């Protein structure tokens, strides 16, 4: 199952050239870029591990891409994403976030629905390891 999180997640994986172009776009907008990684891409896992510090005041995508390459080398089986933070007044939020690496095998999730009294329905997300063990 292909995890779909971030701006370009429904497209084929970006090439290194395309990643550099997107990072350069972010830098030209004056956004701070950061790199994060995780082995748990659950949609409710908002807190990925940060790789280094956010990169403020960079103007060349090569610096960011060097950090992406180092993160890839350190975590070859993790998800890695790039975030672009706009600190300008009125925004102060992540303006762009996209995956730059996926593991070779994505585990996936399953949505379980339980019906309760009346018309109540409860939903739970299960990680593939949880439902394959049964």
Image: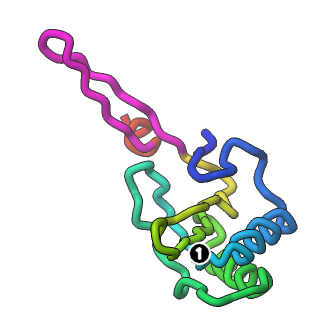
Left or right: 36 as drawn, with respect to 7? left
> Residue at image x 31%, y 30%?
123
Q: Residue at x 76, y 69 (%)?
A: 25
Which of the pair 8/77 is nearer the observer? 8
Picture layout, residue 53 above or below residue 18: below
Q: Name the residue that disc number 1 marks.
A: 35
Quadrant for the N terminus in the image:
top right
Q: Position of residue 26 (x, y in %)?
A: 69, 71
Front residue of 53/56: it is 56
Q: Residues within 10 Å of mark 1 (few under 14, many from 20)?
A: many
Highlighted magenta segment, given as a residue range: 108-127
The number of discs equals 1
Look at 66% across and 70% down and name the residue there.
Answer: 76
Q: Whole-percent x and y of residue 98?
A: 64, 59
Colour scheme of the rendered structure: rainbow
Q: Residue furthest top?
A: 118
Q: Is residue 29 left or right of residue 132?
A: right
114 or 17, which lies in front? 17
Residue 78 vs 27, above or below: the answer is above
Question: Residue 133 lies in what quarter of the image?
Answer: top left
Instruction: Point out the residue furthest to the left here.
Output: 117
Q: Position of residue 29 (x, y in %)?
A: 69, 73
- Looking at the image, which residue sits at the far right? 17
Residue 8, image x and y in percent?
69, 50
Q: Is residue 109 magenta?
A: yes
Element at label 1: strand
Q: Residue at x 77, y 80 (%)?
A: 61
Residue 34: quadrant of the picture:
bottom right
Asked if residue 120 lies in the magenta stretch, the reply is: yes
The quadrant of the image that shows the C terminus is top left
> Please, what is the dominant secondary structure of the magenta stretch?
strand
């Amino acid at each position: 199952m292909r995890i779909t999180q971030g701006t370009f997640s429904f497209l084929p994986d970006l090439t290194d050239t395309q990643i550099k172009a997107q990072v350069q776009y972010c830098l030209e907008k004056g956004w701070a870029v950061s790199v994060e990684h995780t082995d748990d891409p659950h949609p409710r896992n908002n807190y990925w591990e940060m790789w280094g510090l956010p990169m403020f005041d960079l103007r060349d995508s090569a610096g960011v891409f060097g950090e992406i390459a180092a993160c890839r080398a350190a975590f070859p089986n993790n998800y890695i994403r790039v975030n672009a933070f706009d600190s300008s007044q009125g925004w102060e939020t992540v303006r762009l976030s996209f995956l730059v690496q996926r593991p070779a095998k994505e585990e996936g999730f399953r949505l379980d629905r339980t019906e309760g009294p009346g018309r109540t329905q409860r939903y739970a997300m299960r990680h593939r390891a949880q439902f394959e063990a049964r």
